[in-house]
Image (cartoon, helix red, strand yellow):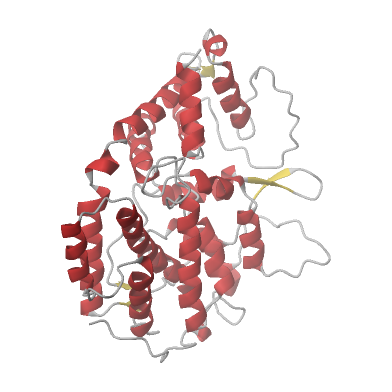
Amino acid sequence: MIKKYERQNYGLLYNVSANEQNPKWNQMIKRENKLYTSKNDIRSPFQRDFNRILYSNAYKRLKSKTQVFFSPSNDHICTRIEHVNHVEAISYTIANELGLNVELTRAIAIAHDLGHGPFGHKGEKILNEISIKDTNQSFWHEKNGLTYVDKIELLDDRDGYKQNLYLTYAVRDGIISHCGEVDQSQIKPRENFIDLTKKYDKVAKYEPFTWEGCVVKISDKISYIGRDIEDAIRFNILDKEELNELKNILKIKKEICLNNTNIINNLIGEVLNYVTIDKGFSFSEEGLNLLNKIKAFNYEHIYKSEKLCQSNEYFKLIIHKIYYLLKSLYNQNTNKIELSYNIKLYPDVINEFLNWLKDYCLQDYFVKNDNKKTKLKNKKIFDISKKENYYMAIILYISGMTDNKAIDTFNKIISF
């Protein structure tokens, strides 16, 4: 039986939290560029990051992106924005109890999944297959999240110019190192300050730079394990026999309700019981065994269920149709975009992409019906004289779409 938490570790990590007394503080709050300021701005560095993420378009779009269950019209299915809010709530509970900086956990938590494309992990897998084939680079949402906050998302400054977010190192680090799917029995912050933009072929294997980043990483795992079960129960993915199997795994008595509340409460208590400054966050043998059994159960009976797999080909059709239409605009002989007859057949789809691309592209090119005169001060990142860069731009563009946006774009391609 998992041991009840008695608050014996209250404030335990205060001296190693992200605060001005921490020797790593200046590295934690480092930005690539200065932000515009106000004379009456009283926010801390991480509060400012939280606000910048909150106002970003990528965050707004999370409400219409799949978490696990694809259902654009069902208001009660957990979407990506609900998931990040759950992670924020869980990480706040853990960080607040241990004396860590809750402003930092909040900022990392709401930003940690900004790199997810449409259709959840299924969409991520499709984009990865395309990316490896056409750019020789892997696509994974943690790296894409860092790319989005570093290079894609733009906010107006006080003079109306679009600028990059320029988030702190600690928040950026928390985004790329947050992967909750990685199996670990122990996690503790790394000491070294590293280049987060270094090219990695797969999910970053290093630990977060801060204790707060570790909390978000653990909270991500707790959140998706518990909430996915609740949705599976609500929508009859699990039958009576499977529910009994899950109750046996959780050692829940028949009279106790099998729901998100009890699952999450037990796992948070497990995290708080076994944290130490020397070893970091760890689980008891029983707690780790429980976590692994729940995860195995979810993969077997939820993520691989027939109902969830029905939409895979549909997702692939949509993403491929969008990608290959936009790819066809590029002439590999001239290394230029050539609109030709396609602009007459698909004007809305093509012009929308090209209007997006021009804000980030080093080259100038003709965009039909472009009446926008955007004031820009952001970094130009795409040199499309190289085809791989153009293909990566398409992948990034699609990854920013919501489920409904991708479906709507697909419908525009196939409709008259």
Along the viewing direction, whichever of 251 and 176 lies nearer the viewer:
251
Residue at 46% from the left image edge and 30% from the top image edge: 407
| Figure check: 303 above or below 12 | above
Total number of numbered labels? 0
The image quadrant of residue 370 is: top right
Residue at 22% from the left image edge and 73% from the top image edge: 254
Is 337 left or right of 137, judged from the image as shown?
A: right
Find residue 319 and report its horizontal and vertical position in percent.
Answer: 40, 30
Along the viewing direction, whichever of 4 and 204 lies nearer the viewer:
4
Is 42 left or right of 250, judged from the image as shown?
A: right
Where does the N terminus fall, quadrant-wise?
Answer: bottom left
The image quadrant of residue 299 is: bottom left
| Figure check: 347 above or below 175 | above
Residue at 36% from the left image edge and 49% from the top image edge: 68
Residue at 56% from the left image edge and 80% from the top image edge: 22
Is 264 left or right of 102, judged from the image as shown?
A: left
Whether residue 195 appears in this view of the structure is no
Task: In the displayed orientation, state which residue is furthest to the top.
Answer: 341
Is 178 left or right of 183, judged from the image as shown?
A: right
Find residue 33 and report its horizontal and vertical position in percent.
Answer: 67, 55
